[in-house]
Amino acid sequence: MVESGLTLSLFRKGTALPESTAPIFDEARLAIGDRADGPTMLEEIGRAQKGAYDSMLFIRGEEPVGLICCESVDDDARLTFGHVLRSFSSKKAAVFNMAVDALVDKQFKVIRSNLTWPEPEGFSETAVAMGFVVVDRLSMVIEGDPGRTTGPLPHGTEIVRWSPEYFDDVARTMCETADPMDRVVYPQYQTHEGCKAMLRNILENKYGEFLPRQSFIALSGGRFAGYLLSILLPDGTILIVDIAVDPAFRRSGIGGAMIDSIVGGSDKKRIYLAVTTSNREAESLYRSKGFRVETAVRQHILAPGRGK
């Protein structure tokens, strides 16, 4: 693929990247400076350099210009890292366009990125011009606390560990309770079948290692009332990938009790979750349980055929 004098070369996940990419990674590391999310970005760069993602290398003549990496689950692609050498900064728009076009050609239904890259300027503006929708989200964190106990619950309510028998209940509740902006970030939430597919991917470790002992089901009088699902990320942290309470059981302490359960049962591991800034009720709950905001993220989402 050639555009604006650039050539794109694709390196599949697990393939060693050529030595010519080293200056791109070196400059990217230096560009991070003292950013608060610097350690996380350095880990992402390290994984990219080791071939943990599919990588698109952009070349002009024989000179490397930049690199964009992505990972995919089914028909959903996430751009994980990108950097264009400063000497070619005028090529940022062309690089981003070529990367997105390559993914569109592969029939991905959703292309997304937080663009938490060392130098996102230029990429973000190009994404918006291409039709990406921007959603503001907060990344929140808490440390596991083995001393945390579950608060009082209404009579007949209990929190139990994940069991496959609740698959259909979880998928149904996932679809019915998703926040409107979360439906933009993850279009799978828009349909019952999409939620079932997402839940299967979680259970099959496609987003990270599913943690059944740190995933919970809430029952009230024997009826399904809510769920919390968590995964282990490559860096050893835990991500609460989804949490929801059936509307009939809200404001009874169930959501907080499930959070208490994972915080109290995760030793001292760091536990993350993400929430859209429009979901004030959820953010308030997380803050009340001790979560603090680590970073504010502007997630960019494109559904080819709708925005482009």
Image (cartoon, helix red, strand yellow):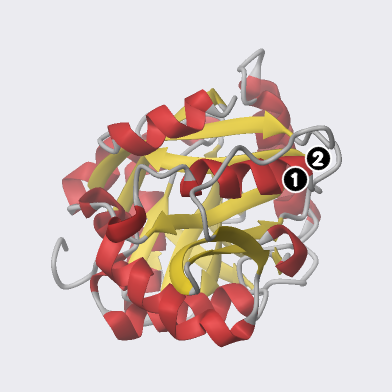
- Front-most of residues 221 and 197: 221
For label 1, the crowd category at 10 Å Cα-Cα, with few meaning under 14, some 14 to 19 and many 20 or more, is some
The quarter in which the N terminus is drawn is bottom left
What residue is shown with label 1?
Answer: 237
62 displayed left or right of 182: right
Please determine whether, in this image, residue 23 is positioned above or below residue 49. Answer: above
Please determine whether, in this image, residue 104 is positioned above or below residue 237. Answer: below
Please determine whether, in this image, residue 286 is positioned above or below residue 290. Answer: below
- Front-most of residues 209 and 251: 251
Q: Quadrant of residue 267?
A: top right
**What's the residue type where badge 1 is placed?**
Thr
Per the image, label 1 sits on a secondary structure element best described as loop
Residue 134 image label: none
Q: Quick check: can you spot residue 60?
A: no
Residue 269 image label: 2
Point out the tag, 1 or 2, that comes first from the N-terminus. 1
**What's the residue type where badge 2 is placed?**
Lys
Q: How many marks?
A: 2
The quarter in which the C terminus is drawn is bottom left
Q: Residue at x 48, y 55 (%)?
A: 243
- Residue 40 lies, in percent from the top left, at 68, 34
The reply to whether discs 1 and 2 touch (Cβ–Cβ < 8 Å) is yes
For label 2, the crowd category at 10 Å Cα-Cα, with few meaning under 14, some 14 to 19 and many 20 or more, is some
